[in-house]
């Protein structure tokens, strides 16, 4: 297994933190707030270490994919909130987080 494959696998595994928060909450395993508060920092630090490792190794492909995912995630979150705001102001919450 190459170093690039290990970086990709670690980053991919770290990206499941957000969905694990939701699925664990829906299954009644943990509170979304508690899990997010406990897991966010270690997962983020781990992903930052992998990002820095990729920069040091000059893995341009990994860095481009990670940047694209980051920007896409931000745009998706912003779009979600922009669509939700008019409903919330009208007293409805059809898309509760």
Image (cartoon, grey):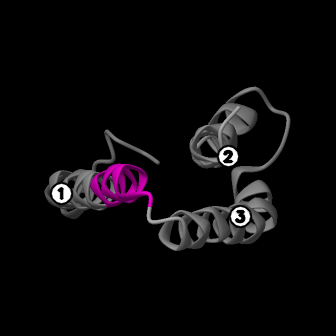
**Residue count near mark 2 (Cα–Cα under 10 Å), binned few <14, some 14–19, many ≥20:** some
Magenta stretch bounds: 59-70
Residue 60 included in the magenta stretch of the image: yes
Name the residue located 64 percent from the left edge and 67 percent from the top edge: 44
Give the residue at mark 2: 10
For the N terminus, the quadrant is: top right
Residue 90 tag number: 1
* Mark 1 to mark 2 CA distance (whole Å): 42 Å
Towards the viewer: 14 or 18: 14
Number of marks present in the image shown: 3
Q: Locate residue 2 relative to residue 87 in the image: left or right.
A: right
The picture places residue 10, in percent across and down from the top left corner, at 67, 46
Label pair 3/1, CB-CB below 8 angstroms: no
Q: Give whichever of discs 3 and 1 has the lower sequence position.
A: 3
Q: To which quarter of the image does residue 52 belong?
A: bottom right
Q: Work out whether mark 3 precedes mark 2 in sequence or the reverse, and give the earlier one.
A: 2
**Residue furthest top as drawn:** 27
Main secondary-structure element of the magenta-colored stretch? helix
Does 72 sit above or below residue 54? above
């Amino acid at each position: 297994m190459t170093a690039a494959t290990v970086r990709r696998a670690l980053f991919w595994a770290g990206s499941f933190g957000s969905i694990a928060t939701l699925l664990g909450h829906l299954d009644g395993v943990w509170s979304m707030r508690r899990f997010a508060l406990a897991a966010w920092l270690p997962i983020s630090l781990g992903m930052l270490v992998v990002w820095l490792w990729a920069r040091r190794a000059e893995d341009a492909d990994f860095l481009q994919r990670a940047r694209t995912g980051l920007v896409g995630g931000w745009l998706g979150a912003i779009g979600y909130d922009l669509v939700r705001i008019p409903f919330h102001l009208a007293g409805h919450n059809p898309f509760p987080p």
